[in-house]
Structures are given as structure tokens and as C-alpha cells.
Image (cartoon, rainbow, N blue to C red):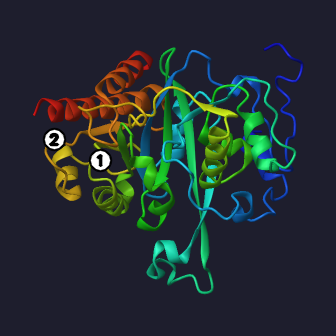
């Protein structure tokens, strides 16, 4: 039995509409978090306020070790668009940390790379990594 | 590691599970890359992702409304104002510091909306083609051109048993491909074959980017 089959046996996990989870916002506060963005809990012993939503708590707990946003969303059965909004809040509030660079070079000046394209170094590593596995 | 609960994920919220320790990335990983795997229904996207992924492929769903996809698209679905689109994905840790995500995306127009941002920053797209339903790949290629014209893509013919075999030239002509677009063959059920197809795309994407930076 796969992990997905197990999920399917469970009742609908989202009786609460997405707009309640995100406080009515459809868009995140920053545009650097993508599905493949790597996240990890900030590590200091800062506690979430008692008023924090269960989604916030769950996402932070899920990211106690390094994981991509899309994996965290899938395990929590949250739509990616909702998980992005929740993750942005956690990053803004200092509970969650974005690891390294995003493939589009966001947050890192890349004058030679057009926006939205990965840099040559990353492309080379992907190619060599795949060739080694083939 | 080494806790007794390793393989028995604990429930977090109703209907959700915590990731087991083995699902997490090594702490040495610093950056991620992604490749989109696109194709018509049944072209083998999920199969390919399943053959190469180191984790059990996962699925996420987005609910989209009629307003965001254009009313024409739901013309055949009376009374239906929202629809759910699913995306399957997998993961390959390539090196100590780099992990690659594979996102399987349906190619039809109405499915692009929620995943539009996925194309940004992607290495490229591998377009899986089933030669028994060649016409399905036309819309996929069309949408790729319209929605992500900067994204390098390669065509991979998924060799289904009993599927018609065409010469590469016939396929290029039928799909109206540029001469430089790679046309590869793969068996989506086979890990090595699928990895070779992904490497073919990555090699092409690197060449395209090198050409751009030297120009």
C-alpha cells in the first residue's frame, strides 16, 4: 500500500475554506517561495503565539528538518497556493528559513542570467548529476 | 534518526501525516532545481516520475474556479464552477548539495493556470508523447509555446508496446518542431531510460543557456 492510498482512506482534511486559512489573502507576501523552495524551521526556541492557526503549526512542525514547500504541502494535504501563503508568513515572522538559492536566482544578483532561468552552474550540475545516475 | 516512530508517521491534523525522517532531505542540500514533465492524459508522466523518484510520488491538488480558466473550458460541464487539478511530483537528490524535483503537469490549457509559476526557474520541460495519440501532444506543445516560450523543451516518445513507430522526421513534421528541438525515445517504466531522457533535456537546456550568454 502506498502512502497515497493511505491518504485516500482519510476523511476530507479541509473542512475549512482556503480563504480562512490564509486570512482572506490569495497572494503571498513575497514572491520568492516556489513549490521547490527548500524550507527549514529557524531553529531557535521561539514559540508560535497561541493564536497561530493549525496550518501554521503543522507546516512549521513538518519543516523541522529540510523539506521543499511542495512536499510539505502534499504531506499536509494543503493546496500549494495555500501553503505558500502560510510559509511566507512563517518566514516573515522569523519561524521558518528559506535555504540556499532558488533556481530563478531570486535573492541573488545574477546579471548574466535572464530572470526566470536557472544559472549555468546549476544547469551543469543537473546534467552531470543525471548522467551519473543513468 | 533512530527514534522508534521512524516508520509510523504520527497524525498531525485530521487527514494528514507527518513526514517520516527518511522523507527529509540531507542537511547538506543547499539548492533545488526542477524539470517539468508534461504530456496529454495517459502519456506516462506519472509512470516516468515514479520510475526515477527516490520518494513515493506525491500529489497536490488545486481548486480552480471557472473565472480563472475562462468560461469556454467548462462549457461541457453544466453547473460546475470549480474544478480540481492535480499535480504529481517526485524527487531525485543529484549531489550532496543539489536536489531535483520533477513536476508532472497536464498539458491542456485549462490546467495551466494554477501551475503557471512552475515554469519559472525550471531547467526545462520534457514533453512525453504517446504515438497512439499523437494529436494530444499538439495542444501540449501549443500551450508550452504560449505559456512558457522561454522554457527549453525536448520531446520524448514514450515507447508503448504496440504503439506505432514513426521515423524522427515524420514526428518532427507532424509536431512542427524546430530543427534544434531534441526528439528522444524512452520507456517511462524504465529508470535508466527515463533518466537518459531527462539528461538529454538538461544537456539541451545547458546548450541553449550557454548560447544565450555568449551571444
Q: Vertical placement of B189 versus B163: above or below? A: above
Q: Quadrant of residue B124?
A: top left
> How many other residues sit within 10 Å of disc 2, few (<14), some (14-19) or many (≥20)?
few
Q: Mark 1 lies on which chain?
A: B
Labels in figure, total: 2
Residue B99 in view in this figure: yes
Relative horizontal placement of residue B196, taking residue B181 as reference (left or right): right
For label 2, the residue is B180
Q: Please report the residue visible at 43 percent of the width from the left and 34 percent of the height from the top.
A: A107
Quarter of the image where the C terminus of chain A is located: top left
Label 1 and label 2: CA atoms lie apart by: 21 Å
Of all residues shown, which one is farthest toward the left? B215
Residue A76, position as x, y percentages in the image: 74, 45
Camera-near label (1 vs 2) is 2
For label 1, the residue is B165
Q: Which mark is residue B2?
A: none
Of all residues shown, which one is farthest toward the bottom? B78
The reply to whether callout 1 and callout 2 are in contact (CB within 8 Å) is no
Relative horizontal placement of residue B185, taking residue A69 as reference (left or right): left
Residue A106, position as x, y percentages in the image: 41, 37
Relative horizontal placement of residue B181, taking residue B142 as reference (left or right): left
Q: Please report the residue visible at 15 percent of the width from the left and 32 percent of the height from the top.
A: B211
Name which of mark 1 and mark 2 comes first in the sequence. 1
Badge 1 element: loop
Q: In which quarter of the image is residue A47?
A: top right
Q: Please report the residue visible at 60 percent of the width from the left and 48 percent of the height from the top.
A: A84
Amino acid at each position: 500500500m502506498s502512502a497515497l492510498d493511505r491518504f485516500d482512506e482519510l476523511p476530507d482534511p479541509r473542512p475549512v475554506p482556503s480563504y480562512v486559512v490564509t486570512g482572506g489573502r490569495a497572494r503571498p507576501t513575497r514572491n520568492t517561495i516556489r513549490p521547490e523552495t527548500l524550507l527549514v524551521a529557524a531553529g531557535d526556541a521561539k514559540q508560535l503565539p497561541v493564536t497561530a492557526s493549525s496550518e501554521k503549526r503543522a507546516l512549521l512542525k513538518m519543516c523541522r528538518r529540510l523539506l521543499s514547500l511542495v512536499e510539505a504541502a502534499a504531506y499536509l494535504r494543503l493546496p500549494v497556493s495555500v501553503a505558500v501563503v502560510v510559509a511566507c508568513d512563517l518566514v516573515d515572522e522569523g519561524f521558518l528559513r528559506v535555504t540556499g538559492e532558488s533556481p530563478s536566482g531570486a535573492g541573488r544578483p545574477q546579471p548574466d542570467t535572464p530572470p526566470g532561468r536557472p544559472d549555468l552552474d546549476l544547469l551543469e550540475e543537473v546534467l552531470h548529476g543525471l548522467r551519473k545516475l543513468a | 534518526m533512530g527514534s522508534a516512530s521512524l516508520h509510523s508517521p504520527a497524525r498531525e491534523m485530521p487527514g494528514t501525516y507527518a513526514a517520516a525522517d527518511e522523507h527529509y532531505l540531507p542537511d547538506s542540500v543547499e539548492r533545488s532545481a526542477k524539470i517539468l514533465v508534461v504530456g496529454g492524459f495517459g502519456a506516462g508522466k506519472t509512470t516516468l516520475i515514479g520510475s526515477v523518484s527516490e520518494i513515493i510520488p506525491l500529489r497536490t491538488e488545486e481548486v480552480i474556479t471557472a473565472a480563472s480558466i475562462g468560461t469556454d473550458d467548462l462549457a461541457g460541464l453544466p453547473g460546475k464552477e470549480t474544478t480540481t487539478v492535480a499535480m504529481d511530483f517526485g524527487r531525485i537528490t543529484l549531489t550532496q548539495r543539489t536536489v531535483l524535483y520533477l513536476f508532472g503537469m497536464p498539458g491542456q490549457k485549462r490546467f495551466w493556470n494554477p501551475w503557471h509559476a512552475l515554469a519559472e526557474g525550471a531547467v526545462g520541460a520534457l514533453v512525453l508523447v504517446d504515438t497512439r495519440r499523437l494529436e494530444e501532444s499538439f495542444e501540449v506543445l501549443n500551450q508550452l509555446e504560449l505559456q512558457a516560450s522561454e522554457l527549453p523543451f525536448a520531446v520524448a516518445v514514450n515507447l508503448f508496446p504496440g504503439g506505432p513507430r514513426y521515423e524522427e522526421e515524420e514526428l518532427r513534421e507532424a509536431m512542427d518542431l524546430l530543427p534544434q528541438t531534441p526528439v528522444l525515445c524512452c520507456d517511462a517504466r524504465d529508470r535508466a531510460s527515463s533518466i537518459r531522457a531527462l539528461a538529454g533535456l538538461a544537456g539541451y537546456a545547458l546548450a541553449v543557456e550557454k548560447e544565450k550568454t555568449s551571444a
